[in-house]
Amino acid sequence: MKHYRQTFLLILGLAMQFSLPVTGQGRLTVEEAVNLALQKHPAVKASALAVRRNEQLLGAARNIPNPDLTFDSPSGVFYTVGVQQTFRFPTVYGRQYQQQQQQVALAQKEQAVTANDLRYRIHTIYAGIQSAEAYQRQWLAQDSVYAQISRAAQRSFDVGTIDKLALLYAQTQAAEVKNQVRAAAFQVSAQKKQLELLTGLSLSSSVLTPLVKLPSPAVDTFLIVQNPAVQAAQQWEAVTQKAIEVERANALPGFMVGYYNQGTREASLGLRWRAGISLPLWAGQYKSRINAAQTEQQMARQYTEVRKQTISLDLQKAQDDLLAAANSVTFYETVALDQADAIISTARRFFESGQTDYTNFLRTTNDAYAIKLRYLDALQNYNQAVIAIHYLTGTL
């Protein structure tokens, strides 16, 4: 009996470290994963194409109408060639070009939104894999101990030193831990598949950096203006402002100039030119378009306020989550983890000396390992809150 105790208690002492050595595989950092995703993700490529499209439209912003080329007989005696060109008021073209410049800037802001969302997703998945691997290492450490205990309990039962209840309890605990090992392995595999899909990289030959506590971010509510979604909403305001200026310019007179011989062939060159002006007599339609553009600007302003309010609420929640998780992490790191190790070592000493049986030993170590698992929960919540704050403040 003492020999069995010494065998799996030696394994227990090694398993208390609950960290597996990393082999000489390539290491993939979260920054590398983000860069790969930004290069390969179709949404990022689409947003870059949207920027290019709007830049290409700059050349069409000054959309002067095509000239009219005519060939007719104004006098009924001969045919002559004529040409006529119409123009909007000159400020229209300048305003349209400025509006298209703002459209380019809006596409760039939306590109930043897409990139920020993708960064957040990669960071979240990466942190999830780190946590899942930490859980897996913890359960593997328990599994190695509990498997030894289960086998030792079977041998003790065979020689009649423990009863059936103690054997069943040891076997049940070992089976439960082994089930958790399988569940943890599935969780790691599932999240790695997500990261592989986003980065286009096979993780079979790569390992991630281990789970660590991320630095606590400096939080300032004014940082929400750096959020790409807020900046995109503000840029939409700039676009609508230029739209108002374009509509106002459209309400100004237009011009026409042309060459057209309406007299005889002998008419002097000066008498063959024609010029005109288009009068914006139907003021109602221009006023309606200006009013509609102003209403759209008001909509844009309200949308910006909605974005700011939503992000402020999310940021406040992330701050609260960070504070709660930070307190838990501090408690576990300063108090609970040391106590868990003390519980395991004390239980081992009592069991080795014969002062406790299998059942009490397993219950005690279960409680200690549960503390370690709750610490991993708290650390995961803390890191996710840090990532959320960086995402919301545009500093990810």
Image (cartoon, rainbow, N blue to C red):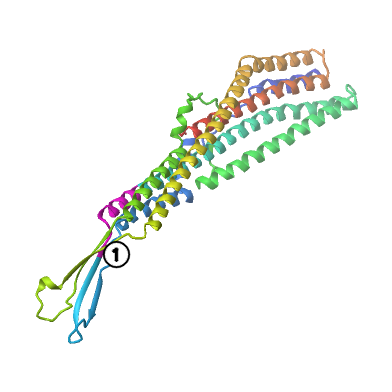
The quadrant holding residue 280 is bottom left
**Going 29% across and 61% down the picture, which residue do you hit?**
279
What's the magenta region?
86-101
Question: Horizontal placement of 245 versus 158: left or right?
Answer: left
Q: Which amino acid does label 1 sit on?
A: Pro
- Which image quarter holds the N terminus? top right
Q: Position of residue 43 (x, y in %)?
A: 48, 49
Residue 176 lies in magenta, yes or no? no
Q: Is residue 91 magenta?
A: yes
Can residue 367 be spotted in the picture? yes
Q: Answer few, some or many: residues within 10 Å of disc 1's Cα (few below 14, many 20 plus, some between 14 and 19).
A: few
Instruction: State left or right for residue 70 relative to residue 199.
Output: left
281 or 309: nearer the eye?
A: 281
In the rendered image, residue 314, in percent from the top left (x then y), is placed at: 56, 33
Q: Where is residue 328 in the image (x, y as percent from the top left)?
A: 63, 20
The residue under the point 45% across, 28% down is 222
Residue assigned mark 1: 65
Rendered view: 372 above or below 28: above
Seen in the picture, residue 176 relative to 325 is either above or below; the reply is below
Asked if residue 49 is positioned above or below residue 222 in the image, the reply reads below
Q: Is residue 29 visible?
A: no
**Could you tell whether 243 is left or right of 341 in the image?**
left
- 122 vs 52, nearest the viewer: 52
Classify 291 as above or below 267. above
The image quarter in which residue 182 lies: top right
